[in-house]
Amino acid sequence: MSIARDALDNHGLIVGVSPERFRAVAMPLLFDHLNAQCEGTIAVNRQARIVWINDKYAEKVGIRDPASVLGKEIEEVLPASRLREVVESGLPSIIDLMAFGDEHFVVTRIPLRDEDGTLVGALGFVLFDRARHLKPLMSKYTSLQTQLVATQNELAKARRARYTIAGFIGNSPAASEIKRQARRAAQLDATVLLRGETGTGKELLAQGIHNLSPRARGPFVAVNVAAIPESLVEAELFGTAPGAFTGADRKARIGKFEVANGGTLFLDEIGDLPLPLQAKLLRVLQEQEVEPLGSNQVKALNVRVIAATHIDLEAKVAAGQFRDDLYYRLNVLALRVPPLRERASDIPAVVEHLLDDIANRSGQPPMELSPEALALLCAQPWRGNVRELGNLLERAQLSADGPQLQAAHLLPLLGEQARSADAPAYASSAPSAALPTEAAPSEELPLQPLAQTLAQAERRALQSALAACKGNRRRAAMELGISRASLYSKLQQHGLSQR
Protein backbone atom coordinates (compact mmCIF):
# COMPACT_ATOMS: atom_id res chain seq x y z
CA MET A 1 0.00 0.00 0.00
CA SER A 2 1.46 3.35 -1.00
CA ILE A 3 1.53 6.34 1.32
CA ALA A 4 -0.05 9.60 0.30
CA ARG A 5 2.28 12.42 -0.63
CA ASP A 6 1.00 14.67 2.21
CA ALA A 7 1.94 11.98 4.71
CA LEU A 8 5.59 12.99 4.22
CA ASP A 9 7.27 16.12 5.57
CA ASN A 10 10.36 18.00 4.40
CA HIS A 11 12.62 15.78 6.47
CA GLY A 12 11.18 12.56 5.20
CA LEU A 13 9.25 11.62 8.33
CA ILE A 14 6.56 9.16 7.38
CA VAL A 15 3.39 8.47 9.33
CA GLY A 16 4.04 5.36 11.35
CA VAL A 17 7.80 5.97 11.40
CA SER A 18 9.84 3.71 13.67
CA PRO A 19 11.15 5.09 17.01
CA GLU A 20 14.74 4.74 15.82
CA ARG A 21 14.05 6.79 12.70
CA PHE A 22 12.14 9.39 14.71
CA ARG A 23 15.05 9.89 17.15
CA ALA A 24 17.58 10.08 14.34
CA VAL A 25 15.65 12.89 12.68
CA ALA A 26 14.01 14.64 15.64
CA MET A 27 16.94 14.93 18.01
CA PRO A 28 19.06 17.17 15.77
CA LEU A 29 15.96 19.27 15.17
CA LEU A 30 15.39 19.55 18.91
CA PHE A 31 18.99 20.57 19.54
CA ASP A 32 18.93 23.15 16.74
CA HIS A 33 15.68 24.55 18.13
CA LEU A 34 16.99 24.81 21.70
CA ASN A 35 20.27 26.27 20.52
CA ALA A 36 18.42 28.91 18.52
CA GLN A 37 15.82 29.77 21.16
CA CYS A 38 18.00 29.68 24.26
CA GLU A 39 20.29 32.44 25.42
CA GLY A 40 23.33 30.18 25.37
CA THR A 41 24.50 26.56 25.06
CA ILE A 42 27.58 24.79 26.38
CA ALA A 43 28.76 21.17 26.36
CA VAL A 44 31.28 19.28 28.52
CA ASN A 45 32.84 15.82 28.28
CA ARG A 46 33.11 13.06 30.89
CA GLN A 47 35.85 15.00 32.66
CA ALA A 48 33.65 18.11 32.83
CA ARG A 49 35.96 19.94 30.41
CA ILE A 50 34.39 22.29 27.88
CA VAL A 51 34.16 20.76 24.41
CA TRP A 52 31.84 23.31 22.83
CA ILE A 53 30.26 26.71 23.59
CA ASN A 54 28.14 28.74 21.22
CA ASP A 55 28.79 32.36 20.39
CA LYS A 56 25.79 33.67 22.33
CA TYR A 57 26.93 32.02 25.57
CA ALA A 58 30.51 33.22 25.07
CA GLU A 59 29.36 36.78 24.49
CA LYS A 60 27.03 36.66 27.50
CA VAL A 61 29.82 35.72 29.88
CA GLY A 62 32.38 38.02 28.29
CA ILE A 63 34.48 35.51 26.32
CA ARG A 64 35.83 37.08 23.10
CA ASP A 65 37.15 33.88 21.59
CA PRO A 66 35.01 30.76 22.30
CA ALA A 67 37.87 28.51 21.20
CA SER A 68 40.06 29.88 24.00
CA VAL A 69 38.05 28.08 26.69
CA LEU A 70 37.89 24.67 25.02
CA GLY A 71 39.50 22.02 27.19
CA LYS A 72 39.18 24.04 30.38
CA GLU A 73 37.33 22.67 33.38
CA ILE A 74 33.83 24.10 33.48
CA GLU A 75 34.33 25.76 36.89
CA GLU A 76 37.21 27.85 35.53
CA VAL A 77 34.83 29.57 33.15
CA LEU A 78 31.53 29.28 35.05
CA PRO A 79 32.30 28.99 38.79
CA ALA A 80 28.67 28.32 39.76
CA SER A 81 28.07 25.69 37.08
CA ARG A 82 26.79 22.27 38.21
CA LEU A 83 27.41 20.45 34.92
CA ARG A 84 30.01 18.33 36.70
CA GLU A 85 27.29 16.98 39.00
CA VAL A 86 25.19 16.02 35.96
CA VAL A 87 28.16 14.22 34.39
CA GLU A 88 28.93 12.35 37.62
CA SER A 89 25.33 11.41 38.47
CA GLY A 90 23.88 11.00 34.98
CA LEU A 91 20.76 12.81 36.19
CA PRO A 92 19.34 15.96 34.60
CA SER A 93 18.81 19.27 36.37
CA ILE A 94 15.71 20.59 34.67
CA ILE A 95 15.33 24.09 36.16
CA ASP A 96 17.91 25.93 38.24
CA LEU A 97 19.25 29.42 38.91
CA MET A 98 22.93 29.90 38.21
CA ALA A 99 24.76 32.96 39.44
CA PHE A 100 27.29 34.69 37.19
CA GLY A 101 28.62 37.89 38.67
CA ASP A 102 25.64 40.03 39.63
CA GLU A 103 23.31 38.17 37.26
CA HIS A 104 21.27 35.01 37.65
CA PHE A 105 20.58 32.75 34.65
CA VAL A 106 17.69 30.30 34.46
CA VAL A 107 19.35 27.12 33.19
CA THR A 108 18.65 23.49 32.41
CA ARG A 109 21.22 20.70 32.27
CA ILE A 110 20.92 17.29 30.63
CA PRO A 111 23.30 14.32 30.38
CA LEU A 112 24.62 13.27 26.94
CA ARG A 113 24.73 9.57 26.03
CA ASP A 114 25.92 7.75 22.94
CA GLU A 115 23.97 5.14 20.98
CA ASP A 116 24.88 2.46 23.55
CA GLY A 117 23.62 4.60 26.41
CA THR A 118 27.12 5.35 27.67
CA LEU A 119 27.40 8.72 29.39
CA VAL A 120 29.74 10.89 27.37
CA GLY A 121 29.12 14.38 28.75
CA ALA A 122 26.46 16.97 29.50
CA LEU A 123 24.71 19.90 27.85
CA GLY A 124 23.79 23.16 29.54
CA PHE A 125 21.25 25.62 28.19
CA VAL A 126 20.59 29.17 29.43
CA LEU A 127 16.82 29.31 29.06
CA PHE A 128 16.53 32.94 30.17
CA ASP A 129 19.15 35.46 31.06
CA ARG A 130 16.74 37.18 33.43
CA ALA A 131 14.63 35.56 36.08
CA ARG A 132 11.75 37.92 35.19
CA HIS A 133 10.47 35.27 32.81
CA LEU A 134 9.76 33.16 35.86
CA LYS A 135 8.16 36.02 37.74
CA PRO A 136 5.03 34.12 38.96
CA LEU A 137 7.16 31.21 40.17
CA MET A 138 9.80 33.47 41.66
CA SER A 139 7.15 35.56 43.46
CA LYS A 140 5.77 32.45 45.09
CA TYR A 141 9.28 31.25 45.91
CA THR A 142 10.20 34.63 47.42
CA SER A 143 7.02 34.66 49.50
CA LEU A 144 7.68 31.18 50.85
CA GLN A 145 11.31 32.07 51.50
CA THR A 146 10.24 35.17 53.46
CA GLN A 147 7.82 33.11 55.54
CA LEU A 148 10.51 30.52 56.17
CA VAL A 149 13.01 33.14 57.34
CA ALA A 150 10.39 34.75 59.60
CA THR A 151 9.51 31.37 61.11
CA GLN A 152 13.17 30.52 61.64
CA ASN A 153 13.72 33.87 63.34
CA GLU A 154 10.73 33.30 65.62
CA LEU A 155 11.97 29.83 66.51
CA ALA A 156 15.46 31.17 67.19
CA LYS A 157 13.97 33.90 69.37
CA ALA A 158 11.90 31.35 71.27
CA ARG A 159 15.05 29.29 71.88
CA ARG A 160 17.05 32.28 73.05
CA ALA A 161 17.65 32.72 76.76
CA ARG A 162 16.07 36.00 77.90
CA TYR A 163 17.56 36.43 81.35
CA THR A 164 21.02 37.23 82.62
CA ILE A 165 22.57 36.49 85.99
CA ALA A 166 22.14 40.17 86.86
CA GLY A 167 18.39 39.56 86.54
CA PHE A 168 18.54 37.67 89.84
CA ILE A 169 17.47 40.65 91.95
CA GLY A 170 19.21 41.33 95.24
CA ASN A 171 22.44 42.40 96.89
CA SER A 172 22.19 40.41 100.11
CA PRO A 173 25.10 38.12 100.98
CA ALA A 174 23.05 35.08 99.91
CA ALA A 175 22.07 36.63 96.56
CA SER A 176 25.59 37.90 95.88
CA GLU A 177 27.06 34.48 96.59
CA ILE A 178 24.71 32.55 94.29
CA LYS A 179 25.38 35.06 91.50
CA ARG A 180 29.12 34.65 92.02
CA GLN A 181 28.78 30.87 91.82
CA ALA A 182 26.60 31.13 88.70
CA ARG A 183 29.16 33.33 86.93
CA ARG A 184 31.85 30.83 87.79
CA ALA A 185 29.71 27.95 86.50
CA ALA A 186 29.12 29.82 83.22
CA GLN A 187 32.83 29.64 82.41
CA LEU A 188 32.95 25.87 82.97
CA ASP A 189 31.26 23.55 80.49
CA ALA A 190 30.36 20.95 83.12
CA THR A 191 26.87 19.80 84.06
CA VAL A 192 25.16 22.06 86.62
CA LEU A 193 22.61 21.02 89.24
CA LEU A 194 20.50 23.88 90.62
CA ARG A 195 18.85 23.05 93.92
CA GLY A 196 16.25 25.18 95.61
CA GLU A 197 12.62 25.56 96.51
CA THR A 198 9.90 26.25 93.98
CA GLY A 199 9.86 29.85 92.81
CA THR A 200 13.40 30.78 93.83
CA GLY A 201 14.54 31.56 90.26
CA LYS A 202 16.33 28.39 89.17
CA GLU A 203 15.41 28.75 85.49
CA LEU A 204 16.41 32.42 85.53
CA LEU A 205 19.85 31.43 86.76
CA ALA A 206 20.03 28.62 84.20
CA GLN A 207 19.37 31.12 81.42
CA GLY A 208 21.89 33.51 82.94
CA ILE A 209 24.56 30.79 83.03
CA HIS A 210 23.85 29.96 79.38
CA ASN A 211 23.97 33.62 78.30
CA LEU A 212 27.33 34.13 79.99
CA SER A 213 28.84 30.90 78.64
CA PRO A 214 30.61 30.23 75.32
CA ARG A 215 27.34 28.60 74.22
CA ALA A 216 25.41 31.88 74.39
CA ARG A 217 24.83 31.96 70.61
CA GLY A 218 23.38 28.44 70.69
CA PRO A 219 19.80 27.51 71.63
CA PHE A 220 18.50 27.37 75.18
CA VAL A 221 15.84 24.67 75.50
CA ALA A 222 13.87 24.24 78.72
CA VAL A 223 11.96 21.07 79.57
CA ASN A 224 9.88 20.50 82.69
CA VAL A 225 10.21 16.76 83.18
CA ALA A 226 7.35 16.67 85.68
CA ALA A 227 4.95 18.23 83.17
CA ILE A 228 5.39 15.48 80.54
CA PRO A 229 3.33 12.27 80.77
CA GLU A 230 5.63 9.41 81.73
CA SER A 231 4.84 7.52 78.52
CA LEU A 232 6.04 10.44 76.39
CA VAL A 233 9.18 11.50 78.25
CA GLU A 234 11.53 9.33 76.17
CA ALA A 235 10.14 10.58 72.85
CA GLU A 236 10.17 14.18 74.06
CA LEU A 237 13.79 14.09 75.19
CA PHE A 238 15.44 11.72 72.72
CA GLY A 239 13.17 11.88 69.64
CA THR A 240 11.59 9.09 67.61
CA ALA A 241 12.27 7.25 64.37
CA PRO A 242 9.49 7.20 61.74
CA GLY A 243 6.66 4.94 62.93
CA ALA A 244 8.49 4.09 66.16
CA PHE A 245 5.24 3.08 67.83
CA THR A 246 1.52 2.84 67.08
CA GLY A 247 0.15 6.25 66.30
CA ALA A 248 3.59 7.79 65.85
CA ASP A 249 4.25 10.27 63.07
CA ARG A 250 5.49 8.74 59.84
CA LYS A 251 8.24 11.31 59.84
CA ALA A 252 11.11 11.30 62.30
CA ARG A 253 10.62 13.60 65.28
CA ILE A 254 13.69 15.15 66.83
CA GLY A 255 13.90 15.30 70.60
CA LYS A 256 14.82 18.19 72.85
CA PHE A 257 18.44 17.04 73.08
CA GLU A 258 18.83 17.47 69.32
CA VAL A 259 16.96 20.79 69.39
CA ALA A 260 19.45 22.01 71.99
CA ASN A 261 22.49 20.79 70.03
CA GLY A 262 25.25 23.38 70.25
CA GLY A 263 23.59 25.05 73.23
CA THR A 264 22.09 24.26 76.62
CA LEU A 265 19.29 21.92 77.70
CA PHE A 266 17.59 22.86 80.99
CA LEU A 267 15.94 19.86 82.64
CA ASP A 268 13.66 21.20 85.36
CA GLU A 269 12.34 18.85 88.04
CA ILE A 270 14.93 16.24 87.13
CA GLY A 271 13.99 14.26 90.24
CA ASP A 272 10.75 13.26 88.51
CA LEU A 273 12.50 11.52 85.60
CA PRO A 274 11.21 7.92 85.40
CA LEU A 275 13.74 5.39 86.68
CA PRO A 276 13.88 3.38 83.39
CA LEU A 277 14.98 6.51 81.47
CA GLN A 278 17.66 7.54 83.91
CA ALA A 279 20.13 5.06 82.41
CA LYS A 280 19.54 6.49 78.94
CA LEU A 281 20.04 10.04 80.21
CA LEU A 282 23.26 8.96 81.90
CA ARG A 283 24.56 7.57 78.61
CA VAL A 284 23.70 10.78 76.76
CA LEU A 285 25.56 12.83 79.38
CA GLN A 286 28.61 10.57 79.30
CA GLU A 287 28.86 9.86 75.57
CA GLN A 288 27.31 13.04 74.12
CA GLU A 289 25.23 11.00 71.70
CA VAL A 290 21.54 10.15 71.49
CA GLU A 291 19.64 7.21 70.04
CA PRO A 292 16.04 8.14 69.09
CA LEU A 293 13.24 5.84 70.14
CA GLY A 294 12.81 3.05 67.59
CA SER A 295 16.05 3.86 65.79
CA ASN A 296 19.31 1.95 65.48
CA GLN A 297 21.29 5.06 64.59
CA VAL A 298 23.27 7.03 67.15
CA LYS A 299 23.54 10.79 66.64
CA ALA A 300 26.45 12.80 68.02
CA LEU A 301 25.58 15.80 70.18
CA ASN A 302 27.24 18.81 71.75
CA VAL A 303 24.86 19.80 74.55
CA ARG A 304 25.40 21.17 78.03
CA VAL A 305 22.83 20.07 80.59
CA ILE A 306 21.67 22.22 83.47
CA ALA A 307 19.31 20.31 85.75
CA ALA A 308 17.16 21.62 88.57
CA THR A 309 15.18 20.12 91.42
CA HIS A 310 13.40 21.16 94.60
CA ILE A 311 13.31 17.68 96.12
CA ASP A 312 15.86 15.80 98.21
CA LEU A 313 17.73 13.77 95.58
CA GLU A 314 19.85 12.06 98.22
CA ALA A 315 16.70 10.67 99.83
CA LYS A 316 15.50 9.41 96.46
CA VAL A 317 18.85 7.74 95.86
CA ALA A 318 18.65 6.07 99.27
CA ALA A 319 15.12 4.89 98.49
CA GLY A 320 16.23 3.41 95.15
CA GLN A 321 14.11 5.87 93.17
CA PHE A 322 17.03 7.71 91.59
CA ARG A 323 20.21 6.19 90.19
CA ASP A 324 23.26 7.04 92.24
CA ASP A 325 25.51 7.12 89.13
CA LEU A 326 23.20 9.65 87.46
CA TYR A 327 23.10 11.67 90.68
CA TYR A 328 26.90 11.89 90.74
CA ARG A 329 26.97 12.77 87.03
CA LEU A 330 24.49 15.62 87.53
CA ASN A 331 26.01 16.84 90.78
CA VAL A 332 29.26 18.07 89.20
CA LEU A 333 28.56 21.76 89.85
CA ALA A 334 25.88 22.02 92.51
CA LEU A 335 24.41 25.45 93.24
CA ARG A 336 21.91 26.01 96.04
CA VAL A 337 19.51 28.82 95.20
CA PRO A 338 18.55 30.54 98.49
CA PRO A 339 14.87 30.95 99.36
CA LEU A 340 13.50 34.47 99.67
CA ARG A 341 13.23 34.26 103.45
CA GLU A 342 17.03 33.81 103.68
CA ARG A 343 17.52 37.11 101.91
CA ALA A 344 14.75 39.23 103.37
CA SER A 345 16.77 42.40 102.79
CA ASP A 346 16.32 41.81 99.04
CA ILE A 347 12.52 41.88 99.28
CA PRO A 348 12.13 45.66 98.67
CA ALA A 349 14.18 45.44 95.46
CA VAL A 350 12.34 42.29 94.38
CA VAL A 351 8.98 43.95 95.06
CA GLU A 352 9.97 47.01 93.01
CA HIS A 353 11.05 44.80 90.10
CA LEU A 354 7.83 42.76 90.25
CA LEU A 355 5.64 45.87 90.36
CA ASP A 356 7.43 47.29 87.32
CA ASP A 357 6.97 43.99 85.50
CA ILE A 358 3.26 43.89 86.34
CA ALA A 359 2.90 47.47 85.10
CA ASN A 360 4.66 46.68 81.82
CA ARG A 361 2.40 43.70 81.18
CA SER A 362 -0.83 45.42 82.20
CA GLY A 363 -0.09 48.79 80.60
CA GLN A 364 -0.91 50.51 83.90
CA PRO A 365 1.31 52.85 85.95
CA PRO A 366 3.41 50.95 88.52
CA MET A 367 1.92 50.66 92.01
CA GLU A 368 3.77 51.65 95.17
CA LEU A 369 3.75 50.06 98.61
CA SER A 370 3.30 51.91 101.86
CA PRO A 371 6.11 51.35 104.40
CA GLU A 372 3.73 49.29 106.54
CA ALA A 373 2.75 47.09 103.60
CA LEU A 374 6.38 46.53 102.71
CA ALA A 375 7.25 45.68 106.31
CA LEU A 376 4.38 43.19 106.32
CA LEU A 377 5.74 41.49 103.21
CA CYS A 378 9.23 41.34 104.69
CA ALA A 379 7.88 39.49 107.72
CA GLN A 380 6.36 36.63 105.68
CA PRO A 381 8.03 33.21 105.25
CA TRP A 382 7.27 33.06 101.48
CA ARG A 383 7.11 29.31 101.04
CA GLY A 384 6.48 29.93 97.34
CA ASN A 385 9.31 32.46 97.19
CA VAL A 386 9.48 35.06 94.40
CA ARG A 387 6.75 33.36 92.39
CA GLU A 388 4.35 33.52 95.34
CA LEU A 389 5.29 37.14 96.05
CA GLY A 390 4.68 38.13 92.44
CA ASN A 391 1.32 36.38 92.39
CA LEU A 392 0.23 38.14 95.58
CA LEU A 393 1.24 41.56 94.25
CA GLU A 394 -0.67 41.01 91.04
CA ARG A 395 -3.79 40.00 92.95
CA ALA A 396 -3.40 42.92 95.32
CA GLN A 397 -3.20 45.39 92.45
CA LEU A 398 -6.62 44.23 91.24
CA SER A 399 -8.18 45.09 94.60
CA ALA A 400 -6.44 48.45 95.08
CA ASP A 401 -8.29 51.68 94.32
CA GLY A 402 -5.39 54.12 94.33
CA PRO A 403 -1.76 54.08 93.21
CA GLN A 404 -0.51 52.81 96.60
CA LEU A 405 -0.90 49.37 98.12
CA GLN A 406 -1.60 49.42 101.83
CA ALA A 407 -1.16 46.63 104.35
CA ALA A 408 -4.96 46.40 104.46
CA HIS A 409 -4.95 45.32 100.80
CA LEU A 410 -2.47 42.55 101.51
CA LEU A 411 -3.81 41.05 104.73
CA PRO A 412 -6.87 39.30 103.21
CA LEU A 413 -4.63 37.75 100.55
CA LEU A 414 -2.02 36.57 103.02
CA GLY A 415 -4.63 34.78 105.16
CA GLU A 416 -3.22 32.27 107.59
CA GLN A 417 0.30 33.04 106.43
CA ALA A 418 0.00 36.60 107.72
CA ARG A 419 -1.46 35.49 111.03
CA SER A 420 1.31 32.96 111.58
CA ALA A 421 4.05 35.48 110.79
CA ASP A 422 5.42 37.72 113.49
CA ALA A 423 3.69 40.98 112.65
CA PRO A 424 1.86 42.06 115.82
CA ALA A 425 1.24 45.55 114.53
CA TYR A 426 -1.10 44.06 111.92
CA ALA A 427 -2.78 41.37 114.01
CA SER A 428 -6.03 43.25 114.41
CA SER A 429 -8.82 42.37 112.01
CA ALA A 430 -9.95 45.99 112.08
CA PRO A 431 -7.44 47.79 109.89
CA SER A 432 -8.85 51.20 110.73
CA ALA A 433 -7.71 50.81 114.33
CA ALA A 434 -4.15 49.67 113.62
CA LEU A 435 -3.25 50.47 110.06
CA PRO A 436 -2.82 53.75 108.28
CA THR A 437 -4.92 53.97 105.15
CA GLU A 438 -5.07 56.49 102.36
CA ALA A 439 -8.46 57.75 103.53
CA ALA A 440 -7.61 57.94 107.24
CA PRO A 441 -3.89 58.44 107.99
CA SER A 442 -2.89 57.17 111.42
CA GLU A 443 -0.97 59.41 113.78
CA GLU A 444 -0.07 56.38 115.94
CA LEU A 445 2.35 55.05 113.28
CA PRO A 446 4.54 57.93 112.10
CA LEU A 447 6.50 57.44 108.93
CA GLN A 448 10.00 56.03 109.40
CA PRO A 449 12.88 55.37 107.04
CA LEU A 450 12.30 52.13 105.15
CA ALA A 451 15.48 50.52 106.47
CA GLN A 452 14.36 51.20 110.06
CA THR A 453 10.90 49.76 109.40
CA LEU A 454 12.36 46.60 107.92
CA ALA A 455 14.86 46.22 110.75
CA GLN A 456 12.08 46.50 113.33
CA ALA A 457 9.98 43.88 111.55
CA GLU A 458 12.94 41.51 111.36
CA ARG A 459 13.79 42.05 115.05
CA ARG A 460 10.21 41.26 116.08
CA ALA A 461 10.27 38.10 113.97
CA LEU A 462 13.49 36.94 115.66
CA GLN A 463 12.13 37.64 119.13
CA SER A 464 8.89 35.85 118.39
CA ALA A 465 10.68 32.78 117.03
CA LEU A 466 13.02 32.55 120.05
CA ALA A 467 10.09 32.90 122.42
CA ALA A 468 8.04 30.25 120.62
CA CYS A 469 11.01 27.85 120.59
CA LYS A 470 11.91 28.63 124.24
CA GLY A 471 15.33 29.90 123.26
CA ASN A 472 16.26 26.84 121.14
CA ARG A 473 18.13 28.53 118.32
CA ARG A 474 18.33 25.47 116.08
CA ARG A 475 14.52 25.14 116.16
CA ALA A 476 14.09 28.89 115.76
CA ALA A 477 16.23 28.85 112.60
CA MET A 478 14.15 25.97 111.21
CA GLU A 479 10.88 27.77 111.96
CA LEU A 480 12.16 30.93 110.31
CA GLY A 481 13.40 28.95 107.31
CA ILE A 482 16.97 30.21 107.55
CA SER A 483 20.29 28.58 108.32
CA ARG A 484 21.69 28.58 111.86
CA ALA A 485 24.58 30.76 110.68
CA SER A 486 22.11 33.32 109.30
CA LEU A 487 20.19 33.28 112.57
CA TYR A 488 23.34 33.92 114.65
CA SER A 489 24.32 36.75 112.32
CA LYS A 490 20.91 38.41 112.57
CA LEU A 491 20.77 38.01 116.35
CA GLN A 492 24.12 39.73 116.64
CA GLN A 493 23.03 42.44 114.24
CA HIS A 494 19.95 43.22 116.37
CA GLY A 495 21.72 42.92 119.72
CA LEU A 496 19.87 39.74 120.67
CA SER A 497 22.78 37.32 120.68
CA GLN A 498 23.13 37.33 124.50
CA ARG A 499 19.52 36.53 125.18
Image: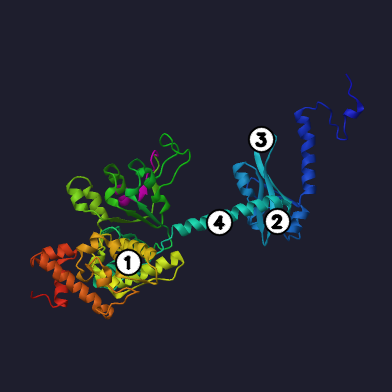
Q: Is residue 391 visible?
A: yes
| Rendered position, 465 above or below 129 | below
Of badges 3 and 1, the one in the foreground is: 1
Q: What element carries label 1?
A: helix
Which quadrant of the view contains residue 339?
bottom left
User: CB atoms at circles 4 and 1 under 8 Å apart?
Assistant: no
Q: Residue 350 carries which label?
A: none
Q: What residue type is labelled 3?
A: Gly
Whichever of labels 3 and 4 marks the residue nearer the N terminus, that label is 3
Q: Quadrant of the N terminus?
A: top right
Distance between mark 3 and mark 1 Cα atoms: 89 Å
Q: Closer to the observer: label 3 or label 2? A: 3
Span highlighted in magenta in the image: 282-295
Judge by depth and name the residue closer to the eye, 378 or 125: 378
State the separation of the CA atoms marked 2 and 1: 87 Å
Say whether residue 278 is left or right of residue 238: left
Identify which residue is drawn at 63% across, 51% down.
Answer: 141
How far from the left and from the top, in percent, is residue 254? Answer: 43, 46
Q: Earlier in the sequence, mark 2 or mark 1?
A: 2
Q: Could you tell me how far apart the alpha carbons at marks 2 and 4 are, in whole angstroms?
A: 40 Å
Q: Is mark 4 on a helix, strand or loop?
A: helix
Asked if residue 242 lies left or right of residue 353, the reply is: right
Q: Are marks 3 and 4 in contact (CB under 8 Å)?
A: no
Q: Name the residue under label 3.
A: 117
**Distance (Cα) linking label 3 and label 4:** 43 Å
How far from the left and from the top, in percent, is residue 133? 74, 52
Residue 165 % position (x, y)? 34, 67
Identity of the amino acid at label 2? Val
- Say which residue label 4 marks: 149
